[in-house]
Image: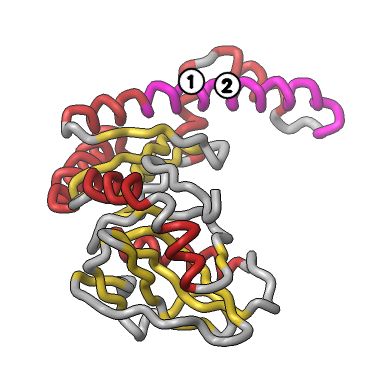
Amino acid sequence: MTRTATRRTESNDDGSASGTAIYVYGIVPSDVETDSEVKGIGDPPSPIDTVRHGDIAALVSEIAVDRPLGTPEDLTAHARILDASAGEVPVLPLRFGAVLTDRDAVTKELLAEHHDEFAAALAELEGKAQYLVKGRYDERVILGEILSESSEAQQLRDAIRDRPEEATRNERIALGELIANAIAAKREHDTRSAVEALGELGVDVALREATHERDAVYVACLAEVSAQSDLERLVDELAERWGERVDLRLLGPLAPYDFVRTARPGG
């Protein structure tokens, strides 16, 4: 299990060291305490800390000003900190790359500027986190399903069987397009089934774009962390209904990336 950076309590603010800037991961309630053993982005990474103002706080760490951001490790660390925190406290995620000069700038340009907006959003997220319902079609099963349903697909398959690729280029292109369109139609149908099932739980839902040609379902939902077992049971029921044709997973709790829009520092 990923170690969370936060838990509820109090702490004090300090200034940042020379040659560093402040990287901001997201916004949390002011009554959180960070775990000094949890590190953020950078090489070497600095401990996660908070900058407080009123009822809210920024989840931050120091970074060296002479090191560019954007490595895969940076992106992973950014998400890891936010997702681990989301299982413990409400969190408003900032997009990757939010950097301010020092802790005073975090207070003045981010927290004070948007205090009431952030506090209201955190209150709405109390006890909630994002979950992803993600499924991918089994290639063998879904192709068999398409071939059994489409005489045109069967004819094209037979036309290219045991024949040179260069001699069947048009047939291969046509079969590829037919399969892609069939999968898209199945994805739409199966996604609608998943959304309807999630709706029965009363959770907020946001559709995500497919990231793979065989994606079956890619849906984000905002749910009570205490009701995670209900989500798990629903996903198990869908997985049983779809059988081997879909490899279905529930991911979370995660930061609510699909359900909040935080202002950029200074914006």
Separation of disc 2 and disc 1 at Cα?
A: 6 Å
Q: Which residues are magenta?
A: 165-191
- Which residue is at the front of the view, 259 or 133? 259
- Which residue is at the front of the view, 71 or 218? 71
Q: Secondary structure at mark 1?
A: helix
The answer to whether residue 182 is magenta is: yes
**Circle 1 is placed at which residue position?**
185
Where is residue 90? Give x, y as percent: 27, 55
- Report which quarter residue 162 is drawn in: top right
Residue at (43%, 52%) from the top-left corner? 113
* Residue 250 in sight from this viewpoint: no
Neighbour tally class for label 2: few under 14, some 14-19, many 20 plus, Cα within 10 Å: few
The number of discs equals 2
Considering only vertical position in the picture, is 42 above or below 204?
below
Q: Secondary structure at mark 2?
A: helix
Q: Label 2 is placed on what type of residue?
A: Asn
* Residue 169 in sight from this viewpoint: yes
Neighbour tally class for label 1: few under 14, some 14-19, many 20 plus, Cα within 10 Å: few
**Circle 2 is placed at which residue position?**
181
